Image: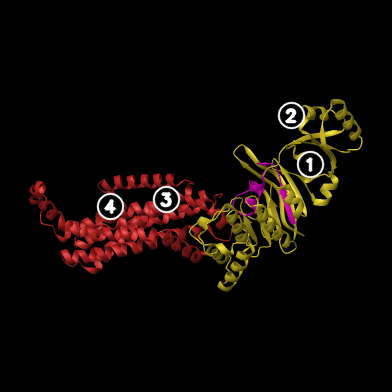
Chain colours: A yellow, B red
Amino acid sequence: MNAIQIQDLHKRYGEVRALDGLQLEVQKGSIYGFLGPNGAGKTTTLRILSGLARADSGKVTIDGDAEVAVNHPSNHIGYLPEEPAFYTWMTPNEFLDYTGEIFHLDAKTRKARASELIELSGLKEAQKRKIGGFSHGMRQRLGFAQAMMNEPDVLLLDEPVSALDPAGRKEILELIQSLRGRCTILMSTHILADVERVCDTIGIIDKGRMVIQADRGELLNRYAVSAIDVELANGSAAKIEEIKATFERIDGVSSVGIEQNTLHIAAQDVQPILPRLMQMIMAQGVQVNKIEVVRPSLEDIFMQLTGEGRVEA
Amino acid sequence: MNLWTAFKKEFLEQRRTKKLLIAVIVLAAFGMLSPLMAKLIPEIFASIPSMAFYANLIPTPTVNDAVMQYVKNLTQFGVLLAVLFSMGAVAQEKEKGTTAMVLSKPMPRGSFLIAKFLGIGLTFLAAVAASALGGYYYTYFLFEALPVGSFLAMNGLLLLYMLVYAAVTLFFSTLTRTQFIAIGGAAGVLIIFNVLAALPKIGQYAPEALIANATNLVLGQPITSWWGLWVSLIIIVVALTGAWLAFRKQEI
């Protein structure tokens, strides 16, 4: 059963086509990773789902509710925007209490829930401080807490860990993982490693259209592009662009990327390429530290499907 | 409806951001100073050797001067505060992103708006009450006792006058994301109403007619038209309804 169902969603901002017939389905209880390059339409989709923006056409249903519309946000959702904003004169407890009151929770439940979420989001020591003095990361944690206040059936997270330090990111990702089965999560992020780590299903959106939507394992298998990493020694690092151009001419190579001193060579099948690659390295006197066959990553698939050289939100 | 929840938050905000305190202090100060200034200006002039001549030209102050000074000060500073307090009420929240946090939850936009107006209204009610208290005492102390019922009614009209501009500014604040456009719109309306108020026959319909009504009420002079009161109430209702109609369809 689907918790979120989006059919043929269109949205324009003047001349810009933000969503162009988007189709999206999120299964109940799953964690859905929503990926796409900058301006692909991820935030627009989440804003429509949360009732903050209006689609030009198409149909959106959340958890069996009637269609979502501006001014009629679903009672069953929790929403964390990309940059959560708060009343800076409130304390975190007061903001959570206010949120709970909007959802008509009684005072006892609000108090207990706020206390639990403050603890979970690591804000216990700051619970009596004004939000105005909070760091970006602390606001992100509080944003996560307020989205959880009503124990939502569907949690919409727009870049939930982008402002967090590694420890904070790990905690929030673990928290997201712990919600698997208890609520449905749709999260947009530009950190592909996080998606690989916590998401069951992955949807890649580009130019307002769904490029692919599949189970994580299935996606990795279907688009399994093997790769060879060649780490150049200092003596050859200066010529990395020249070497890249040479490698790109090898038959069967789909793309060559550069990351510091390493060339990342992607191909459908790396085995026939290896001898030719070695031959070229020897013939041109390229000095290398390491040559390694690496497993395909979600980043490779993402780049292959969207044609992006760099992954962004 | 969530109106009570939104209203509690708004009034807490008025207190925490010191808006309530500022409004009470400013209006109470002018409430007390008005009769004091009316009484003391001739004496102040007389005490300055180079100004003594002018002191003789000023007629002996009466309770009428105190009342007129009170009305003038309260309307000027009251309207200024009403515009300043309302200009960012919605625009600033949209700009900062707090509306997105609140309106993605089941908070009706009408409740969100009305609560803002009620929060500002309560702040001005408290401020006008403090002003009335100070103004009444000093007028009694320096001149004579004013009829209590008329004085209260006068303050009610002055409060309504301030709320007209609070509602108009709130309307512009809802239409835009920039509070400076809101203050510009409110200033434009203020100028138009003042021009209309100066026109014969039409002037009685402008909210500014409330000021004359308020003064006449307490001085026991006849009030020829109550149109200003009805038009003011209509402006408040129209401004808030317009704000709601625009806001309910807005993308945040």
What span is colored magenta in the figure?
A: A31-57
Q: Which residue is mark 3?
A: B87
On the rendered structure, is A46 left or right of A1?
A: left
Q: Which mark is residue A238?
A: 2
Q: Nearer the viewer, mark 1 or mark 4?
A: 1
Considering only vertical position in the picture, is A52 above or below B131?
A: above
Q: Is residue B1 visible?
A: no
Q: Is residue A116 visible?
A: yes
Residue B26 falls in image quadrant: bottom left
Mark 1 nearby-residue class (10 Å; few <14, some 14–19, many ≥20):
many
- Where is the N terminus of chain A found, in terms of image quarters? bottom right
Is the residue at mark 1 from the same chain as the one at mark 2? yes
Q: Which mark is residue A241?
A: none
Q: Nearer the viewer, mark 1 or mark 3?
A: 1
User: Disc 4 residue type?
Assistant: Gln
Secondary structure category for the residue under label 4: helix
Secondary structure category for the residue under label 2: loop
Is the residue at mark 1 from the same chain as the one at mark 3? no
Q: Position of residue A83 (x, y in %)?
A: 59, 50
Q: Position of residue B16 (x, y in %)?
A: 43, 61
Of the two numbered discs 1 and 2 on the same chain, state the one appearing first in sequence: 2
Secondary structure category for the residue under label 3: loop
**Gap between marks 1 and 3, in whole Å?**
50 Å
Of all residues, the one furthest to the bottom in this rendering is A108
Q: Position of residue B244 (x, y in %)?
A: 49, 54
- Chain of the residue under label 4: B
